[in-house]
Each structure stands twice: as structure tokens, then as C-alpha cells.
Image (cartoon, grey):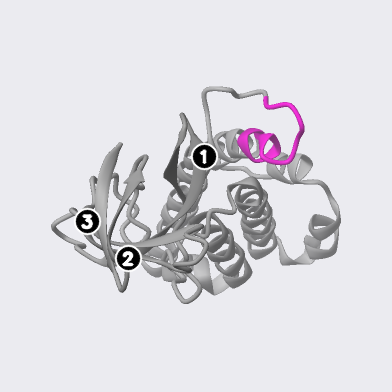
Amino acid sequence: MFNVTLKTSKGDTVIQISALPEVCPFCKYSISPIFKSVALRDISSEDIADMTLKCTNRSCQHVFTAEFVRKWRNADYIYDFRAIPVPHLLRKTTFPALIEAFSSEFIIIYNQAEYAEISQLDKIAGMGYRKALEFLVKDYLINEAPDDAETIKKIMLGPAIQKINDTRIKSIAERATWLGNDETHYVRKWLDKDVNDLKALIKLVVHFIEAELLYKETIASMPK
């Protein structure tokens, strides 16, 4: 809890801020942001305060705005952090060219899920990552067996994963599916895991798929 002095046409106003956001919306690093300025969106109601903050990650140092909403608590008004508005901020995670070549839709869905997460839509972002995983797995299988495309498109994700020959891809994709399903169900099974673990597993699936494709390309281009 700390106080911030706000200069207005009516004079200085001191408002109490409960806590600052702990993650930069640009670099996604955990930070203790530097306070730059604050303004009340509506002086008459004083319901919303917009605070300008600076990322403390040396490789980022972006300035961003955070919203705080006024709440009555402990016989006083306190401004609680609500969200970081990002209407024009679409952080794109890049993926290897080999992945984009056969599953561009996976990349689109993944980045839309990431945009939802950055926009504080944490209740639906996980479902987007789960959908991205399904497109990645099925597009990979279709790339490997194009004659079976129609069958692969129609089966559930679990049976689709069982068609994967590479044991590393299969085992990690299975676990990513477990966490992805948690994001869609009422009761969570993996209580010690969250959407960050799901994203890590998806990226590991991507890594193993790329490694396998690079291996096949190398062997094909350099026969004995």
C-alpha cells in the first residue's frame, strides 16, 4: 500500500494504491514497475485511475498504462489494480519456419490465445491454447500421412496423439492435452499446474516436431 499525489485543477489529491502489476505486458517478465504518473479518468466520480508505469527489465523498459478501480475498504477509498489495457498490443510468439509451413493455423490460434491472456482474459486463454495444440497435432499427422487427412480431421485429440510414432512428441503432447483439458473443465485435476505449464509443453511439442522434421530433411538430402 502506498500513496500517490495527483495534481488537479482543484489542487493536490492523495490517493492510495493497493499494489502495482507484477508482470510487464510487453516482455512478460516479473517486474517491480517504476511509477511515472497517474491521472483520474473522471474527477467528478474518481472511480478509475490510469497510472503510467515503466518496465524494470533492462532489455525491455517499455512504458505502459495500468487501470486502477476505486474500492471502499477499511473505512477508506483504495485503488486496486484492475487491468492493463492493450487494444493495440498483439504480442506474437514466433515459431520455426518448418512449423509454419504445415500448420500456420496453429500459429494464428496460439497468438490469439496469447492476446487473450495478455488482455487479462485468463478464463478463456487456456481453451485457446488447447485448441492450438489440437491443430498442431493434427496438422503434423496430416503432413506425415496426407492420405489419411480426412480421418485425422474427424477423430478426437487423444486418439490422434496415439497415431504419433515419435515417443517424445507423443508423451509430451499427451501431457499438454491433460493440462489443456483442465482449462475447459469445471474441476481441475492438475492443481499444481497452470496455463504457463501448458504453454511450455506446447512449445516442447513444437521443438520435438521441428527436430524430427530437420532430421528427416537432413537424411533425405544426404543419403549414404
Q: Residue at x 86, y 56 (%)?
A: 154
Image quarter of residue 52 = bottom left
Residue drawn where x is 63% and y is 57% of the image:
132
- List x then y, in percent, for residue 58: 13, 57
Circle 3/circle 1 CB separation < 8 Å? no
CB-based contact (under 8 Å), mark 2 and mark 3: no
Q: Is residue 178 above or below residue 201?
A: above
Q: Which residue is mark 1?
A: 72
Q: Nearer the viewer, mark 2 or mark 1?
A: 1
Residue at image mark 3:
35
Viewed as shown, does residue 12 lie left or right of 49? left
Q: Type of residue at label 1?
A: Trp
Image: magenta residue range: 178-188
* Residue placed furthest toward the bottom: 88
Residue 64: which numbered mark, if any?
2
Q: Is residue 223 visible?
A: no
**x, y (%) of residue 60?**
21, 62
Question: In the figure, is residue 172 to the left or right of 200?
Answer: right
Judge depth for marks 3 and 1 and give the one in front: 1
First of labels 2, 1 by sequence position: 2
